[in-house]
Amino acid sequence: MRYATIELNSGYVWWVGEAANPIEACRKSDAESKEDKGGTYRRISRSEITGGGYAVYEVPADFDAVAEEYEKVQAHPFVDYYRCEPDDLEEWERDRKYSWEE
């Protein structure tokens, strides 16, 4: 299955690719953006989206999009909202490195 994720804080397309399920799509989104928290991914409600996460969409096999093309993604079936809850948030915050810091 092919999925696209939109990062909820920025509203940008974060990742497009093949995944077995929406949770794997979110994990791949985090891994490619170096934001992998090593935690547990869970579905979240619309009222929880202010804390970040992903809106996940099912897209066709030949679909691709760049960051600003969120409307292109939103034209496809919406799956749900997901977020990763780090197993140890304090450790993750201390050890995380942004791509611009490397």
Image (cartoon, helix red, strand yellow):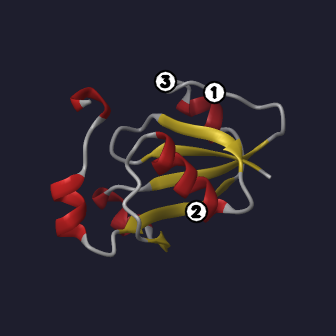
Say if 8 sits above or below 90 in the image.
Answer: above
Pick whichever, 61 or 18, lies toward us.
Answer: 18
Is 28 left, or right, of 93 in this rendering? right
Q: Which residue is mark 2?
A: 80
Few, some or many C-alpha atoms within 10 Å of disc 1 (few <14, some 14-19, many ≥20)? some
Residue sitting at x 36%, y 60%: 37
If you read the primary sequence from the N terminus, does the residue marked by circle 2 or circle 3 appear first?
3
Q: Earlier in the sequence, mark 1 or mark 2?
A: 1
Q: Foreground: 92 or 45?
A: 92
- The secondary element bearing badge 3 is classed as loop
The disc label shown at residue 65, or none: 1
- The circle drawn on residue 50 is none
Foreground mark, 1 or 2, reads 1
**Whether label 2 touches label 3, CB < 8 Å:** no
With respect to residue 42, does 95 lie above or below? above
Against 9, residue 39 (above or below) is below
Residue indicated by mark 3: 68
